[in-house]
């Protein structure tokens, strides 16, 4: 039987508390776990190593395939009921060669309610040799009955120093980029690559400042600008998925069976829709996170703490704005942006939340101007 290293999480950064709970779980596993966190927080890497360690196998077993370490992923836009029924049949089998049979369910929130109810049978009273690990970024989309049957482990944003270390960033500029990522490694990689990601960040920063500094600020236009950026991000994700599907079709050969080619294209279209939607939602979150950090910086600058700004490349503008005695305005704008950030964790339709935020910011700014 293969064995794992003493510490299966060696080399991973951040989320020490979550990692400590995973280590503890390996000593006395429960029947089901729910790992919650956005992809850039490192939840995927931890989930993979945790699942392999539960089975007593090396992580590479996921790539090479092992009958006791199985993954369930959405087919198209969702995990389907036939996949969960197959899991239930498989979970009854005893381990082939590993210590346990482990089932790693990715994007668990894509399961419709009927599928989640079918899954309950597998996580309520599974055989002693089986462990189910669900991974999701939007736990509110899971039924309360599913969440209650699992041991929940949450992953938080990484510290700026952890992001910088993971990406090998050094110096003030590297740390500033890490701070601007909001603790999200994937976001940090995008910003590091430059291009559209950095351009979008600059647009969001401009909107954050315009909300209180520009009397002509139009909340509706601001919300549309963010929506357009989200659509562009979704289009990028769709194009990448379509290229992936084209390669899959090409791999079928010069004259593939018509039914097989049609199946691959259908699956590819569903995948493109899911990835595009996920990218749009993620960009909306990135936009709101940028506003949160701008108003946090503005508040810090009003308090004379401009040495720890997230957007240190805009220090001069922030200090200038702070000189106008905007402590109360910064605090109220920060509260509004944080409220919207929390709201986005409870919805996958962020358009109205964004428009409401910009209207609220404009109202705050006008109230501040009236009392100035």
Image (spheres, rainbow, N blue to C red):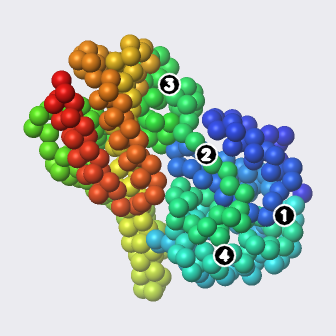
**First in residue order: circle 4 vs circle 3:** 4
Q: Position of residue 195 (x, y in %)?
A: 30, 38
Query: Which is more foreground, mark 1 or mark 2?
Result: 2
**Quick one: SS at disc 4?**
helix
As measured in the structure, the alpha-carbon distance from the residue carrying label 3 to the one carrying label 2 is 22 Å
Within-10-Å neighbours for mark 4: few <14, some 14–19, many 20+? some
**In front of the other: 352 or 360:** 360
- Decide: is 31 above or below 116: above
> Residue 255: x, y in percent?
42, 80
Which residue, given by chain and number where applicable, does mark 1 sit on?
Answer: 100
- Identify the residue at horizontal 42%, vertical 65% (top origin): 274
Q: Which residue is mark 4?
A: 119
Confirm whether residue 75 shows in the render: no
Q: What residue would you read off at disc 2? A: 155
Q: Spatial distance from mark 1 to mark 2, Cα to Cα?
A: 25 Å
Q: Residue at x 50, y 20 (%)?
A: 170
Label 2 SS: loop
């Amino acid at each position: 039987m293969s064995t794992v290293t003493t510490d299966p999480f060696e080399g991973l950064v951040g989320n020490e508390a979550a990692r400590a709970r995973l280590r503890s779980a390996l000593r006395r596993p429960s029947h089901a776990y729910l790992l919650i966190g956005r992809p850039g927080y490192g939840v995927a890497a931890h989930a993979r190593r945790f699942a392999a360690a539960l089975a007593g196998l090396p992580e590479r077993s996921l790539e090479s395939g092992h009958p006791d370490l199985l993954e369930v992923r959405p087919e198209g836009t969702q995990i389907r009921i036939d996949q969960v029924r197959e899991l239930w049949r498989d979970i009854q089998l005893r381990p082939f060669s590993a210590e346990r049979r482990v089932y790693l369910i990715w994007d668990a929130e894509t399961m419709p309610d009927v599928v989640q109810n079918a899954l309950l049978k597998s996580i309520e009273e599974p055989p002693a040799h089986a462990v189910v690990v669900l991974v999701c970024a939007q736990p509110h989309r899971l039924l309360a009955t599913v969440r209650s049957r699992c041991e929940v482990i949450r992953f938080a944003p990484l510290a700026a120093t952890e992001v910088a270390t993971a990406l090998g960033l050094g110096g003030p500029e590297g740390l500033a980029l890490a701070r601007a990522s909001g603790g999200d490694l994937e976001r940090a990689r995008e910003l590091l690559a430059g291009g559209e990601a950095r351009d979008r960040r600059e647009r969001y920063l401009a909107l954050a400042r315009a909300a209180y500094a520009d009397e002509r600020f139009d909340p509706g236009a601001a919300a549309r600008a963010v929506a357009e950026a989200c659509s562009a991000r979704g289009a990028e994700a769709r194009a990448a998925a379509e290229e992936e599907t084209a390669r899959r079709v090409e791999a079928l050969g010069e004259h593939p069976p018509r039914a097989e080619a049609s199946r691959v294209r259908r699956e590819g279209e569903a995948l493109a829709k899911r990835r595009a939607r996920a990218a749009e939602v993620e960009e909306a979150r990135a936009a709101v996170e940028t506003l949160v950090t701008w108003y946090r910086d503005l508040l810090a600058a009003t308090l004379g703490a401009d040495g720890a700004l997230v957007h240190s490349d805009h220090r001069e503008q922030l200090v200038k704005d702070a000189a106008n005695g905007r402590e109360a305005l910064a605090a109220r704008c920060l509260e509004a942006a944080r409220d919207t950030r929390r709201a986005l964790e409870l919805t996958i339709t962020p358009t109205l939340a964004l428009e409401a935020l910009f209207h609220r910011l404009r109202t705050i700014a006008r109230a501040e101007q009236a009392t100035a």
